[in-house]
Image (cartoon, rainbow, N blue to C red):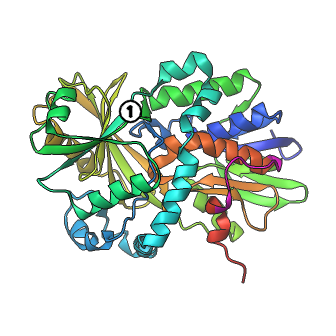
Amino acid sequence: MSSSEHADIVVVGAGIVGLCAALYLQRAGRSVTIVDPLPPGHSTSFGNAGFISAGTIMPIALPGIWRNVPKWLLDPKSPLSVSYRYLPTAAPWLLKWIAASKLDTVHAASNALKALHGDTMARFRELLGPEHFPDLIRTEGSVNVFYGDAPSKSEGFIRDLLTRQGVVTTPMGAAELKEMYPEISPAIKRALYFPNNGYTVSPARLTATLARLFEEAGGTLLSRRILRVTPVEGGIELFTNIGDFRAKAVVLAAGAWTGRLLEPLGVKLPMETERGYHLMLKGANITPRLPLLLRDGGMAITPMEDGLRLAGTVEIAGLDAPPNEERALQLLDRARIVFPTLRADGYQKWLGFRPSLPDSVAAIGPAPGIPGLFVAAGHGHTGMVGSSETGRLVRDLVLGAPPAIDPAPYSLARFNRAA
């Protein structure tokens, strides 16, 4: 494809968000091309915890979180780590993140997350169909576990917020936990069961399946890196590593790299990269019946078809710093807080880049002042659960159809106020 050629709609990014958007647009009768330098799902979507949780309605920044920041910065093993070298760059985002922990902002973010996540299972059933959905996604629920003798203030706030949003949960005590997870530590005394949550047995195979369905229906996948996005008469020009071409409409779903493409256009998107790690345990001696989220330790434990995945923590160090492999190895220590006897024959380490906005609410919608350019990025920790509804919302916004959910909370206008 060259500058003399014109595409209909181009989606930049072959991660889970871009794939869902491309499929919904394609099924609405449009010709769609996906552009990414990597194969589908081979970046951040590859190594996440796999949670597809309708009950995910809590932003990361909660009231009072600022009290923890100083000790987190001083403890290299804390759930949040900030590179001292990168701190001057990250400071403005961190201040916005702390500001987003105000109660009214948290409630607004929670409402937005509920709307984007609440029907995720229904959307994935639409996208995958009856053949692939039960093969790739489990719907038996998930469990949040807490340790310590008494509930913390944040734990109480989380439960109140879940009740406020109507999220169905069932409290679990030590005896019930022991029955579901025989190897669980006696230090884990409380938990919440989310019956409407689920997970994928393989994020990699889920994204590969969506890509195959897209191609089988006539979609085009181009292996190219987008270097520049330029508004031109009648559409958008995309300059790539092997040439340029034009499209009538472009959806930027490039994850943590989206901000770099928008910056030259004067479109503000206060995105930071929350670097997340995983350990994929091979031959683990424990296979949990349901995935767990260790709320106090900021990590997930998910049984997958290729092994037991330990995923989580936050490292603020940008896109270009080398991996800090110790952050990955620490996940095994945290997992043993939950399962003290956990062992494995081996493991694989991984690093991914969460595209995160301070209020934990994704940016979905038209780029202000640039006709034909749309954004679907900034999902942070919830890209897997939020991707399916995001795809449907992108379809409606690009095609000018009445959206099924209110697009206002996700609008880029919240970062780009008119002078």
Q: Quadrant of residue 13?
A: top right
* Residue with the most extreme top position: 131
Give the magenta range. Answer: 399-408
Q: Is residue 339 above or below residue 361?
A: above
* Quadrant showing the N terminus: top right
Foreground residue, 415 or 122?
122
Q: Residue at x 15, y 31 (%)?
A: 178
Q: For mark 1, what is the residue? A: 141
Foreground residue, 227 or 356?
356
Q: Position of residue 111 (x, y in %)?
A: 53, 58
Task: Classify residue 34 as left or right of residue 70.
Answer: right
Neighbour tally class for label 1: few under 14, some 14-19, many 20 plus, Cα within 10 Å: many
Q: Position of residue 164 (x, y in %)?
A: 44, 56
Q: Position of residue 154 (x, y in %)?
A: 28, 61
Foreground residue, 32 or 286?
286
Task: Classify residue 272 as left or right of residue 265.
Answer: left
| Residue 400, magenta (yes or no) | yes
Q: Position of residue 273 (x, y in %)?
A: 45, 58
Please say whether residue 199 is visible from this viewpoint. yes
Q: Quadrant of residue 83?
A: bottom left
Q: Is residue 212 above or below residue 172?
A: above
Q: Is residue 283 above or below residue 102?
A: above
Q: Amino acid at mark 1?
A: Gly
* Residue with the most extreme bottom position: 419
Please say whether residue 15 is visible from this viewpoint. no
